[in-house]
Image (spheres, helix red, strand yellow):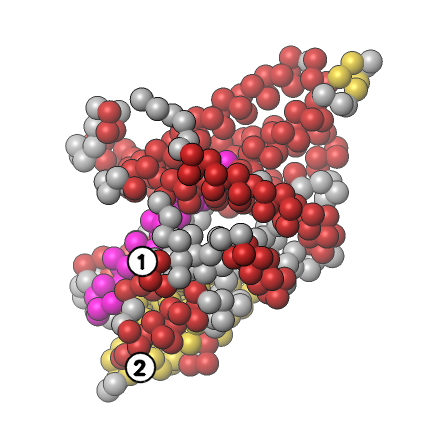
Amino acid sequence: MDFALSDEERAVRDTVRAFVTREVLPLEQEVLRRERAHQPGLDRSELRELQLKAKKFGFWGLATPEEYGGMDLPAVLQSLIWTELGRSFVPFRFGGEADNILFHATEEQKREFLLPTIEGERISCFAITEPGAGSDAANIKLHARRDGDDWVLDGEKTFITNGNDADFAIVVAVTDPEKGARNGGATTFLVDRAMGWRSEFIQTMGEGGPASLIFDGVRVPHRNILGEVGQGFTLGMEWIGKGRYTIPSHAIGIAERALQMAIDHANTRETFGAKIGTNQAIQWMIADSETELEAARWLVLRSAWTVDQGLDPRHASSMGKLYGAGMVNRVVDRVLQIHGGMGYTRELPIERWYRQVRLYRIFEGTDEMQRLIISRDLLRGYTKIGGHLA
């Protein structure tokens, strides 16, 4: 059994780390200054400039198939890259990406939506969550009724990432209430903002914020259906599943950076004539953080490995998401405690991470939903204790 990274994996990781160190980390103080002034950390043009610099490094479209100009990297490599990006709080992501379900588009839809999104000319958002349908995604109410060659959408989506900036939305709507969303009664639509939906900013405890999307008699051509009529819930779950290993991969990077800050502080800060790192209370917080971080790393890498093996990744990904999200919350909390009053200020990124990572236990599947999936798989015999080694 070999736990080492391959030469390729190590080379890719180190190249991303070099890019983050050279191009992203120097922006951190300006990002913090802007956010303290309630401004975006990066504007759209600055993000685009960074993405084009990364393209020169060879990083463009991590998950995008090669036929669309992407790298089509294995899940394990993508996980390692997301960890490196997590080391900085600058809101950067590599370009050349599109929502995974957009690849189900027709050739006409690809020209109108997919290709411009990959090139960064258009911004998309995925809209399934509603005021009464969060974890219970099958309870969506936004309705689409057929009217000739169009569908008319009425209802509201909420907590939509990129909803304030998106040029078009990928909307899951009820098309057959009698069947129900889970049983073929929901359909996915590609809806341009110009068709009439509007977004409303939602203020949260984190930086930036999601949006509510309002659809009031929005007419969408039948040709804008993504996939097939009745396939909406299936596509929605495929979209959500993508985040089950990328989110905790990002969390590992945050925890690594934060823990290193705690170690550096413990080795320099003095109280009562001694470095605070000599105190057992500090030592145990550091030890617990490193242990949990390492456990999360292998759970998450295993979930990505499961994807690469072509196995059903849901059980492994749920464990990685559940533990990784909890781990980064506990680590950042300890790091803030080790820094004392300075950790609570906005001069350091620790309180920012404290607010940011609290979301990781909620979006793309709450802790409670991950526990439901894990326990259900075991109770119904879908998997065995010990997974693929059982």
Q: In the picture, residue 54 is in which quadrant?
A: bottom right
Q: Quadrant of the N terminus?
A: top left
Which residue appears at 47% of the width and 70% of the height? 122
The answer to whether residue 134 is visible is no
Which residue appears at 55% of the width and 60% of the height? 52
Horizontal and vertical percent position of residue 185: 21, 65
- Hey, which residue is sitting farthest right in the picture? 273
- 10 Å crowding of disc 2: few (<14), some (14-19), many (20+): some
- 29 lies above or below 288: below
Q: Quadrant of the C terminus?
A: top left
The stretch in magenta equals 227-252
Q: Nearer the viewer, residue 308 or 245?
A: 308
The residue beneath circle 1 is: 236
- 128 lies above or below 288: below
The answer to whether residue 304 is visible is yes
The mark that comes first in sequence, 2 or 1, is: 2
Q: Is residue 47 left or right of residue 247?
A: right
Residue type beneath disc 2:
Pro
Are dots 2 and 1 in contact, CB under 8 Å? no
Secondary structure under tag 2 reads strand
Residue type beneath disc 1:
Gly
Which residue appears at 60% of the width and 35% of the height? 257
Q: CA distance from mark 2 to mark 1?
A: 20 Å
Horizontal and vertical percent position of residue 256: 56, 32
The residue beneath circle 2 is: 221
Which residue appears at 70% of the width and 35% of the height? 343
